Image (cartoon, rainbow, N blue to C red):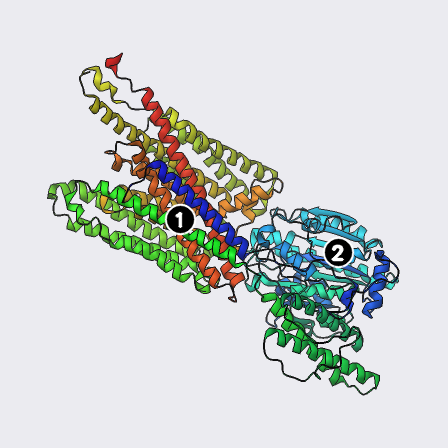
Amino acid sequence: MSSLTCTQLTLCTLTAILIQIIGLSLFVLGFFPVKPALLGVSGPESFRPPGCDPVQNRNVSNPRPDQLKSLYQELRDIPPSFDRLILMVIDGLPAEFVLGKDGRPPSKVFMEAMPYTQSLLANGMAVGYHARAAPPTVTMPRLKAMVSGAVGGFLDVAFNFNTQALLDDNVIAQFFNIGWKMVMLGDETWLKLFPGLFTRHDGVSSFFVKDTVEVDHNVSRHMGDELNRTDWNLLILHYLGLDHVGHIGGRSCLLMGPKLKEMDEVIKLIHLSSSQSQDNDQGRTLLMVVSDHGMTENGNHGGSSYEETDSLLLFVGLKHKPYEYPSVVHGTVYQVDIAPTLALLFGVPIPKNNVGVLISETFDSLTDDQRLRTLELNSWQLLRLLKAQLPKLSCGNLSCDVVGDDIWPGSMECNGSDEEIFCCLFLNSAALHKSWKLGRLSRSNSTDDYIISVLAYESFLRAASEWLSRRATYKPAGLLVSGVAAMVMSSVLFIGLLLLLDHEVYHWKMHGLSYMKSNMHKWHLDETFVLAVIFVLVLSMGSSSMVEEEQYVWHFLVSTLYLVLLRKTIQSLTTRTAQTLITLIKGQNKRTSSQIFSIILILVTGRVMRGWHQGGVNWVHLPDISKWLEQAGRGYVKSTYLISWICIICLGLYLLSLSKSERYVVVVIGCAFLVPGVLVLQHIINYQESAFAASSYSATSMAQIVYAILVILSLATIVALPWFMPVQNPKIFSRYDDCLSSNFLADNRWKFLLVGYGDITYVIGWAYMLFWCLLQLLLQQPINAMPIFLLLVQILATMCYCSSSGPHLKQWVEVTALYYLGMSGHFSLGNTNTLATIDVAGAFMGISSHSTLLSGILMFIITYASPMLALLSLVMYMSVKVTSSLQVSDTGYFLKMSVGFPCLVPLGLNSIILVAYTIVLLLMRNHLFVWSVFSPKYLYVCATTACVYIGIFVVSITAVYAYFVFVFRNKMLSTPYCQR
């Protein structure tokens, strides 16, 4: 097997990364394409059966809004139920806060917080529904679903942070086309989705989650004036404060009750004003109170749990006779059902890509004929969408006035293919409707005939809606196959480079060690288990439950790996018979005892971290250390935070003192990094007592100062230290004996160079790790401070173990152990494979105004705190392994040995997981949980890949830069005295 030069290895690695990026991009574009939609907008033809010629305006080709409105009223045969609409969006409000859960009323706290709303429900003046939201449960795709009735693409979760104009057909645009004047107050997402459609507006950013007061005050301050005006038809009020309260303090936050009370007062004001306007003959106004999504116990959202998808839909102003509380809640509907309901209530066409079904109870005030007409219009729209998705769908002859006479009488059972079933259901409902009409003309129809017709329509509508909602988006096979092939090729290339490097490095290491040659090609238990971890992870990816609870897999496998290393260490102690007893006692026992202690420390801290956050997705209710501390009170959390800060600072200064650098260098660097450490502590003392104080100007300014100091110090350490670190030089030997051989001087010069390089990478690695820990203390939730410290202890203990491992433990095993610690720690910080655990609140620490880029970077830093810390620690790890390279005399070979494994091992491991999960996702493309479980996990896998790229880039650039600067300085100081 031939060896590669350092340059060749670098080029091959970059090629593999490029191929992987191309493959990943192709697969993502193929698997998560923009959902195909019917072009154009619904017009007069939507009031005619599918297949009929478009309805032409009798007078003009481009009717004015008032003419179009009149045409719609003429064609639909149903008068509009209301004149004006007030759409009140309470962001993040779970329906159970208002309607209760499982047939039970809300808790007493929530009932008392919204007394007026509860009185409306109890008196029959309001009708409430649990409106189920589809994942991802973030604002932008939920608003799209409400106004267009379409199920958005999964990647809308990414577009949520950079909203673009909505081009699909929707009720807002339909209202605008008939001349409605619209006003929007609140979340600026509406302005981005519908630019130029609002007569008046005042938008606020939805991402500055620390603000719970001004975002709502900015809406309410205009409301009184708008309610007194008569120049608008649609008023949108989007309140963000409740969602922000949840992000900061969760469902049980002390401010949740007052915020609900504030929303109740708004509903009261609107309802009283609307009632007064109706009494003054100013038209009927419908108040619709909705929420875009719910929230978990911690106040987050984005996933598919019941708590996140349980959104509210409340109609205030429908004519309903009073009835008892349980009758007010009409069960569960879907968020996409809002669009067709609004369209039919206000006399505009249903959006073309709607997959929702009208909420029939909202049309109770209509006559039987009008109610059947609404069902007919909804069924025509869904049939058009079905025909676009199923080209073979053909339902016989449809007359443009009534259903043809050659259809079956409406009593057949519907079986066969999808096309046959949908045609059967549609024609069945149409025939029953026609039969009811004929019976009405002859006055022979009965109530049962009407009910049967309604049930037939509802059967078709629900079947069509469910099929369209769950239908997998078209996935071009070419892109998917090309993407998978490229990622497989990249993974094979990474593995090949690792095998080549392992063979070359260990062939050199074993040269001359005869007692090791027989074991050189043997696979030991630790090496086999490291690969078994990957195998177990790949197998677990095929189970949705294992994906949701992946933290248990990582905790178990990492603990087992270190038990295997403990066994190997003890075995090595008992099998070394070649050494003398004195040598064993003086040196080997001390080293082995250090290794054993390190592993025990890792196992103990790992058990504590496992118990810190152990709920995952399905078992979040289980007790753990974090919940116990939060229930004990804020003082306990703060004390834990302070202890963690003290431990990290003390441990950091102790590690710096172990450096072999000059004392003044250690003192200067230590004092410099102590400054941001003290500022972080001050921030904790002043602003963590109240979570809401963190949004103040002083808190933001201090956080910005900490960012600036940490970045400047870290960059200064990386850039300047290789130039100013004292260089030891062997030329002093020639002062008294210039007859020393040049080979002797060169050999010693090389050894001094490696020792100096080890000191530099040690200090830079220390700076990286302390910088990252201080940054996490500032950004993470206070409850996560102790896991950050424990993770640092685990990484340092692993390096302590590796520093004494000798040739018995392969370097790729050591790097893999560090990588596994980072992945296990990722879940110990409370992360899961659902989007709901992403800490949005921390992403705005130190940001005075909303910035998608900056908040996105901070969100990434918070989420991948543990994997990135493990990757950054590889710089210090390289310094630990420098002593094993003292006999290397070639620059390229040394870089290949020192940098090769720390860079290739994470890239190789991640590539295997990426390829495996890509194949799993492809196989699970039709699975029930493909969008709620497997797709969010794939986004995490992609983000982990980006994390590995960034970490390895930093490690490799740092190592190469420090080495060449130090070599350059060493050459400048290496002129022999005998030549002077």
- Read off the residue under disc 1: 822
Residue 850, position as x, y percentages in the image: 62, 43
Q: Is residue 874 left or right of residue 53?
A: left
Element under label 2? helix
Please, which residue is most extreme toward the top here? 980
Please tell me in which quadrant of the rendered image residue 962 appears: top left
Q: Is residue 781 above or below residue 289?
A: above
Q: Earlier in the sequence, mark 1 or mark 2?
A: 2
Q: Is residue 347 above or below residue 766?
A: below
- The amino acid type, in three-letter code, at marker 2 is Ala
Whether residue 92 is visible:
yes
- Read off the residue under disc 2: 173
Label drawn at residue 442: none
Residue 501, position as x, y percentages in the image: 30, 43
Residue 872, position as x, y percentages in the image: 40, 41
- The amino acid type, in three-letter code, at marker 1 is Gly
Q: Is residue 224 left or right of residue 113?
A: right
Q: Are discs 1 and 2 less than 8 Å apart at CB?
A: no
Q: Quadrant of the N terminus?
A: top left
Residue 736, position as x, y percentages in the image: 19, 15
Element under label 1? helix
Q: Give whichever of 945, 263 is nearer the camera.
A: 945
Q: How many marks?
A: 2
Q: Give whichever of 253, 571 is nearer the camera.
A: 571
Q: Is residue 486 left or right of residue 651?
A: right
Q: Give whichever of 857, 87 is nearer the camera.
A: 857
Whether residue 123 is visible:
no
Q: Quadrant of the C terminus?
A: top left
* Mark 1 → mark 2, Cα distance in angstroms: 49 Å
